[in-house]
Image (tube, helix red, strand yellow):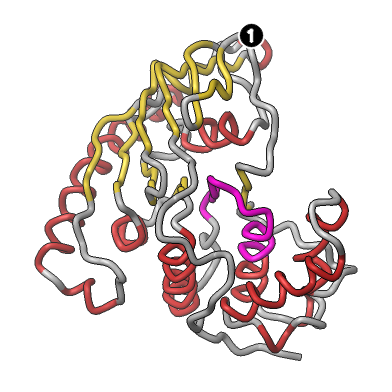
Amino acid sequence: MTNTENTCPSGTSEMHKNEPAGGKISIRNATKLYDPDGANVLALDNCSMEIEAGEFCVIVGPSGCGKTTLLNAIAGFHGITSGQIDIDGKMLCSGARKADPGADRIVVFQNGALFPWYTVLENVTFGPAVQGKMSKEVARKEAEQILAEMGLKGILHNYPSEISSGMRRRVEIARAMMNDPNVLLMDEPYRAMDALTKTIMHKNLLDVYDRSKKTVFFITHDLEEAIFLGTKVYVMTTRPGKIKKVINVDLPRPRDYKILSSDRYLELKLEVIESVHEEAKKAFEAGERELA
């Protein structure tokens, strides 16, 4: 049983690209109204964003502000009530049309979704082989290369129950990368991890990002995580959600944890904290009124 975490070495697979192939996301006046039992819950209200191809976009905001609602609309899990979302200049969804799920947008789920009865290698090769995108042999070779780049070469034949939670999450990212998506959608993927494992996971994800230049749409409540990972941090208002502020994270790449003590990092952290705290206070006060 393997239980050690390895950092990601340099590699030479198809993940290495100088420029993003696509993944520009344009969100214009996206509104989402839920109506459970006639409650008419307005989750998103004319939310607009412009996310460039190859951007590491991080979304922060109070619980219930519509972060996951927005991700689910991009993924095609549900529609929006009005507005429009485009990818690379083509309409993905609107008030009249729900997005179709596609291999150009891959979700890394918060709670994990590996098949427990398959080995690591079988999990990573499953999608492309079943869909007929690759032969089993080509898929195996590509998976071996990607897993090696992510520091997972020694666990190819282990089952998910035999490896650590951090390794399982890296396997899920490797599986996503096998489909060569333009957009990687991540909803609090490291929420349940301890601080030490998180630091390893952050470095590994940044290695993947720096090599692949994929667009990353990343949701988190961890403000330090947001600044360390992101190209831009988008702060959402309390419900109904819209974009309150966009913060450019002008920290150099590649990044390591020495940057956490830099003056610029601390300035950005304070700016994000102040912006989010104001919205969290509004959400708390609204909850107090609802309970009164």
- Residue 20 screen position, x and y as percent: 44, 50
Q: Is there any visible trace of residue 218 in the rendered image?
A: no
Relative to 48, say whether 275 is above or below.
below
185 part of magenta stretch: yes
Q: Is residue 146 left or right of residue 265?
A: right
CA neighbours of label 1 inside 10 A, class few (<14), some (14 to 19), many (20+): few
- Magenta-colored span: 172-188
Choose between 146 and 233: the one closer to the eye: 146
Q: Where is residue 185 in the image (x, y as percent from the top left)?
A: 55, 47
Residue found 58% across the figure and 71% down from its top: 13
Direction from residue 81 to residue 127 in the image, left or right: right
- Residue at 23% of width from left, 37% of height from top? 278
Disc 1 marks which residue?
A: 38
Q: Residue 44 placed where, x, y %?
A: 45, 22
Residue 107, x across and y down, in percent: 62, 48
Query: Residue pushed farthest left?
Result: 263
Residue visible at 39% across and 43% down in the picture: 59
Q: Nearer the viewer, residue 98 or 112?
A: 98
60 is higher (above) or lower (below) than 242: below
Task: Count the numbered circles shown.
Answer: 1
Snapshot quadrant of residue 229 = bottom left
Is residue 51 in view?
yes
Residue 40 among those drawn in magenta: no
Which quarter of the rendered picture does the C terminus lie within? top left
- Assign the N terminus to one quadrant of the image: bottom right
Please tell me whether mark 1 sits on a helix, a strand or a loop: helix
Residue in front for this viewpoint, 175 or 213:
213
Which three-letter amino acid code belongs to the residue tagged 1? Answer: Gly
Quadrant of the image occupied by residue 240: top left
**Residue drawn 49% across the image and 23% down it:** 85
Side of 172 where 219 appears, left or right: left
